[in-house]
Amino acid sequence: MASIKLDKLRKQFKEVLAVEGLNLDIEDGMFVAFLGPSGCGKTTTMNMIAGLEQPTSGDLYFDGKRMNDVPAGKRGVGFVFQNYAIFTHMTVYENVGFGLKVRGCPEVEMKREVGKIAELLELTPMLDWNAGKLSINDMQKVALGRSMITNPGIFLLDEPFSNLDASFRAYMRGELKRIQREIKQTMIYVTHDQVEAMSMADRIAVMYCGQLYQWGSPDDVYNRPVNAFVARFIGSPNMNFIECAYEVENGQGFLQQRKGGLRVPVDAKRRRLLEDRTGPNNLILGIRPEHMKVYQQPEPNALWQGTAYALEPLGPLTIAHTEVGGDRVQVKASGGYRTRPGDPQWVALDLEYIHIFDGETKLVIR
Amino acid sequence: MYQTRPWQKVLRYFTIIIVSIMFFFPTYWMITMSFKPKGEWNSAAGTIYWVPQNPTLDNYKTVLTEYRGQFFRANQSSALPSIRSSIVVSIGGTLFALLIGTLAAYGISRHSTDTGDLPWYIAVGRLGLLVLVMLPFIVLWARLGILATWYGILTFTIIGIVADQIIGRVLGKYYKGAVGSLSFSILQLRMFPPMAILIPVMIMWSTFRLIDTWYGLVIVYGVVTFPFVVWLMKSFFDDIPKELDEAAVVDGSSNWRAFFKVVLPLAKGGLASTALFVFILNWSDFLVALLLTSRNWGTIPVFLNKLVSSEIGAQHGPKAALGLLAVIPPVVFGLLIQQYLVRGLTFGAIKK
């Protein structure tokens, strides 16, 4: 168990700045997800924590101890790679026991420890098998076991489940949560899948282009995104964005849609924020599909009228793509909602949940 | 599939047969020749002996013992020392090249970021520059009379290496790519034809008293085949995901252990095929051995060349016998590693 502190961690490859001044405080025993699209620097950050890459500048601390110059094998870190990195020329037993063997652990103890891990991961019947002959799912378990055996205080997982089939992935997510609860390690989990991050992590670090955009609980990043990128990246389907401008008419503040004539009234608190703001009157309204309602008849609370564009029936719910005043939005509707393209539709917004972003900086106005 | 017409079939088999004869007849001739007595070696008498009329083992006796047989009056030494020499220097040279080449290849595969091919004029240009830079030194060294002293050779070599690195760095500034890299310097070793470097090597070796020693040959064989090992093994290592050695390192093993316990076992197919390739190169070398050996460490090809007597000219029978014996080690080696070979030879060829 260990806490991790990244202090202005920076990594520059020849011409590419992979990680830019990263500051993070990860508490002991926390389950953290690094979330971001590929190439955002998550894996590089992980490699620096593990000791596989040297930071160009900045410091790394485990439990307050500077780790920059400690070699990878001595950091007490377990690492599970995206492609498992199974030693295919060894048996499952040799794979899982590798970390103990290189530490010169006696055979008897090794047998006991490997047995325990195998029990935990349900690998016992396969211990004598050649690791190269395992299924992808079992390989992933072996990779997990091999990292767990030395009982590292920090556990790093680099998109470990991205090659698994969907049902096993869901199962492994649950298993990983359970394992983490049992052994109480600090875990860092790299993923580009927001569902994985949201469902497992205590804290999420949303990264983009080598920068940390947001650091917070799943609740935070979902409900209080700091910028339009985080807002779009978290949530499925994506948040809807509508370019608009702030206007005042008859003492009432509005967000006026740029492409069409739609208006969204803003409450007093937001109004104050918008009026205090300087700079171009260039805003983005963000609203999640689940915070909108779609109707086939006019409704008193439905602000907008639009036309049906497409429909995605997903079973328990339907995603209604609707064109409103030139912008296309996605709305979550009930599973039985059906409409034909071109039909008129009325859309209601839950004004409580709108997000307003600066059109230039994309930062949230809150 | 298109329909094959009968005449096409005939033509195809006819071609196959002709080509087969072209390839197999020399082998057949060598095998039968090794059993022919002296009188049947050539057709001077007007008859061609397609098969031995009076098969004999005299040829084998001649090369394997100091047996004089039916036709030699002069003292004929046996080929056994040359067989021993071939085995020692070929295996030694192969091991030497594999040892340093494999380590170099691993380093280049894992740590070199240079990619991309170089146009030939850059490659040749770099070498040409090196030659130009070194020419005045040769003249100067010759003037000073130290060209064939150990300190002259040593200083000249060091200047050469430094000059090569400087040229590489300078070119690398103006031309993006691998031109300044160590891997390119290694490849460059192969750009001189062996004949061009052998005379200088001979002078150096005689200065260092390495002529006609097994280690002298081992060093030359090792250095000459080293670039092959590096470039073959690099492609095999490139195919092994670097996450494997990283995983081993994170789990607490040293870099050396990760290399020997994880990477090398996975590359053993490539290692085996590289070893065979290099071994055959060393085994069949004639030129280097001819120039760098005299009495004690002449290899099989050198001994074959000597199988001429003033009385009867070329000794075709003993030559064939020894040639046949010389085929055995590569074939046995090949059979031993056959299981790795097919995979090894294709393994490095295909990029995922």
Image (tube, rainbow, N blue to C red):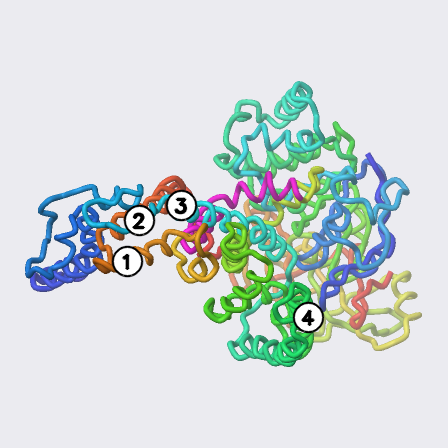
Q: Which amino acid does label 1 sit on?
A: Val
Give the label on residue B252, or none: none
Q: Which quadrant of the structure image shows residue A285?
A: bottom right
Answer yes or no: are tags 4 and 3 on the same subunit: yes
Which residue position is annotated with label 3? B81
Q: Nearer the viewer, mark 3 or mark 2?
A: 2
User: What is the spatial separation of the Cα atoms under label 4 and label 3, in whole angstroms?
Assistant: 39 Å
Where residue B174 appears, as percent x and y from the top left, is 66, 79
Q: Which of marks 1 and 4 precedes in the sequence? A: 4
Give left or right: position of B238 versus A195: left
Q: Which of marks 1 and 3 precedes in the sequence? A: 3
Q: Which amino acid does label 2 sit on?
A: Gln
For the question of whether residue B120 can be seen, the reply is yes
Specify start and end residues of the magenta stretch as a single range.
B256-282
Answer yes or no: are tags 4 and 1 on the same subunit: yes
Where residue B60 appears, as percent x and y from the top left, is 25, 43
Which residue position is annotated with label 4? B159
Q: Which of marks 3 and 4 precedes in the sequence? A: 3
User: What is the spatial separation of the Cα atoms under label 4 and label 1, in whole angstroms?
Assistant: 45 Å
Give the label on residue B308, or none: 1
Q: Which of marks 1 and 2 is in front?
A: 2
Label 3 packing within 10 angstroms: few (<14), some (14-19), many (20+)? some
Give the label on residue B76, or none: 2
Report the chain holding disc 1.
B
Q: What residue type is labelled 3?
A: Pro
User: What is the spatial separation of the Cα atoms under label 1 and label 2, in whole angstroms?
Assistant: 10 Å
Give left or right: position of B334 versus A25: left
